[in-house]
């Protein structure tokens, strides 16, 4: 009980310091459940007086205290444990006018699933089912949700509707005539929906005609549904779900194994995952890092030699990106695509050979880069193009610090991460208050913080949250 009270006071007091959260973040995941106990749509009950946060995590702004035995519905789940705990966004019910409804994030530890009490139904003489709902339709195009609408049922004793996806019941709603499905919805994926009406006596109508609804690709996706891809390494893993924890679909794949993109990307465990139907029979999820688009030369123009070296490569700087342009190939030069390299690392492949440009939006502000490109076809790669001059994206950030400016840490035990994220690998040891360093890049916004890359005088180099630093 002492342990529980200690955690409660540290994780839920409104004055909890960010530096303490950083310390917990590096070690807390060891005692977090591998998977969350609850899902979006579950109804839960608090088992203690519980603090409510505006955002997931112990550093979220304190909103209010929810009394013990309060009931609420989960609307969102943190994508991974934070400080070793799963967090849930909950819409708490308001049973009386003197207790207003609250919406915010709560920790898993003091929640339990609500079980509806069993109330014997009175015997009803009504055995007539309501009429089937009509005009089921999809509204808008999205990558991670499907919005359904339908015509209101005119039955006088109507109680609500039941929503089915791919023949499985996914929700029961009241007399509303719209529903947004966000449960395990993937980009570039087709789903089949039907709905049924039910009345106050419990009679259920026949289901509506099925509606086929397909989600759109996620913005900035490397592949599209239907794209032919192949593996870039040997022993590539295929998993049953888009996660490093997904069950392996054996055998692992050899380099060059071809397949067709079915869905994705889904971002998990620091990877973008694609569902691939491989030619050898395996079907499952593979990390984007191990895939490339496979292009066969169409039509009668068949390449017999490698492409010529791309010419005229120019890098044009904007405030937030670098735009690369190059000359069109000679008429006799058959090109299937271009490989884009930044600082000698392949960052993308352009497969639209009628477009001789590429915009890099992933460059960190304040960091100098050089670029080069390679053309390729079914025979092989061209010689490498001339390298561009060094270019540096201008910071559009807070203006708190400047590149090459000097900073110092505000607190003890300040974390330095290998990437600009709370989930980036820690660069140890943590830093003492007053440790000085030089700003090399930033800011980059992630996990509700502005991150700066600092070259510390003691030798560490990495990313630190702006709230942990002061200008000197």
Image: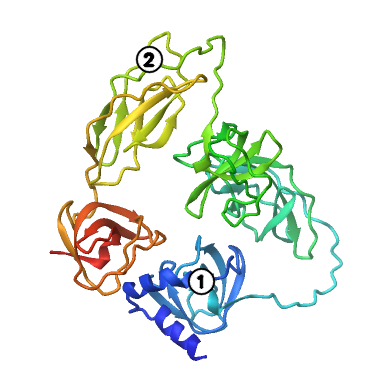
Q: Is residue 32 rendered to the left or right of residue 133?
A: left
For the C terminus, the quadrant is bottom left
Between 73 and 40, the residue placed more toward the observer is 40
Q: Badge 2 local density, few (<14 within 10 Å), some, or many (20+)?
A: some
Residue 321 visible in the picture: yes
> Which of 368/80 is in front?
368
Q: In this rendering, would 113 be left or right of 384?
A: right
Question: Front-most of 92 and 408?
Answer: 408
Q: How many marks?
A: 2
- Does the residue at mark 2 contact the one at mark 1 (Cβ under 8 Å)? no
Q: CA distance from mark 2 to mark 1?
A: 55 Å
Q: Position of residue 333 (x, y in %)?
A: 42, 12
Residue positioned 52% across, 69% down in the render:
86
Which disc is residue 77 wearing? none
| Residue at the spot 50% in from the left edge and 60% down from the top edge | 79
Asked if residue 15 is positioned above or below residue 403 in the image, the reply reads: below
Q: What crowding class fits label 1: few (fewer than 14 Cα within 10 Å), some (14-19), or many (20 or more)?
A: few
The location of residue 210, given as percent across then percent down, is 72, 42
Which quarter of the figure has residue 446?
A: bottom left
Residue occupying image coordinates x 19% and y 54%: 399
Q: Between 342 and 112, which is closer to the camera in this rendering?
A: 342
Question: Above or below — where is 146 with respect to 400?
Answer: above
Residue 99 vertical position relative to residue 252 in the rendered view, above or below? below
Return the residue at label 1: 30
| Residue where numbered disc 2 is placed | 329
Q: Residue furthest left?
A: 472
Q: List x then y, in percent, for residue 355.
A: 39, 22
Earlier sequence position, callout 2 versus callout 1: 1
Q: Position of residue 4 (x, y in %)?
A: 50, 86
- Mark 2 falls on what kind of element? loop
């Amino acid at each position: 009980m002492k342990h529980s009270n200690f955690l409660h006071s540290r994780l839920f007091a409104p004055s909890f310091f960010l530096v303490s959260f950083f310390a917990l973040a590096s070690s807390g995941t060891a005692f977090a459940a591998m998977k969350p106990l609850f899902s979006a749509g579950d109804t839960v009950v608090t088992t203690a007086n519980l603090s409510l946060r505006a955002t997931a995590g112990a550093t979220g702004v304190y909103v209010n205290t929810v009394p013990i035995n309060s009931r609420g519905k989960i609307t969102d789940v943190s994508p991974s444990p934070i400080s070793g705990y799963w967090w849930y966004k909950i819409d708490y019910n308001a049973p009386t006018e003197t207790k207003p409804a609250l919406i915010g994030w709560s920790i898993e530890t003091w929640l339990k699933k609500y079980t509806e009490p069993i109330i014997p139904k009175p015997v009803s003489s009504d055995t007539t089912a309501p009429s089937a709902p009509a005009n089921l339709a999809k509204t808008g195009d999205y990558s991670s949700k499907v919005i359904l609408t339908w015509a209101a049922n005119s039955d006088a004793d109507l109680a609500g509707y039941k929503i089915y996806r791919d023949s499985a019941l996914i929700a029961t709603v009241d007399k509303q005539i719209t529903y947004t499905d966000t449960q395990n919805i993937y980009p570039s994926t087709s789903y089949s929906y039907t709905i049924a009406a039910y009345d106050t006596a419990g009679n259920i109508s026949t289901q509506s005609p099925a509606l086929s609804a397909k989600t759109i690709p996620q913005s900035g996706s490397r592949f599209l549904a239907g794209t032919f891809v192949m593996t870039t390494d040997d022993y590539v893993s295929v998993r049953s779900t888009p996660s490093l924890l997904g069950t392996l679909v054996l055998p692992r794949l050899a380099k060059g194994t071809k397949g067709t993109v079915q869905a994705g990307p889904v971002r998990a465990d620091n990877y973008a995952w694609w569902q691939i139907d491989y030619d050898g029979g395996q079907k499952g999820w593979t990390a984007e890092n191990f895939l490339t688009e496979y292009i066969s030369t169409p039509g009668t123009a068949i390449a017999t030699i490698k492409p010529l070296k791309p010419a005229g490569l120019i890098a044009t700087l904007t405030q937030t990106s670098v735009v690369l342009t190059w000359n069109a190939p000679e008429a006799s030069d058959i090109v299937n695509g271009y490989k884009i390299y930044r600082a000698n690392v392949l960052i993308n492949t352009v497969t639209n050979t009628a477009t001789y440009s590429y915009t890099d939006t992933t460059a960190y502000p304040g960091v100098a880069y050089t670029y080069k490109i390679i053309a390729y076809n079914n025979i092989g790669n061209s010689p490498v193009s001339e390298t561009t001059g060094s270019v540096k994206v201008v910071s559009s950030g807070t203006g708190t610090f400047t590149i090459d400016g000097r900073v110092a840490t505000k607190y003890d035990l300040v974390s330095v991460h290998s990437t600009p994220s709370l989930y980036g690998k820690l660069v140890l040891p943590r830093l003492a208050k007053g440790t000085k360093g030089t700003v090399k890049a930033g800011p980059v916004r992630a996990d509700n913080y502005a991150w700066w890359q600092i070259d510390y005088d003691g030798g560490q180099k990495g990313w630190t949250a702006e709230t942990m630093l002061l200008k000197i």
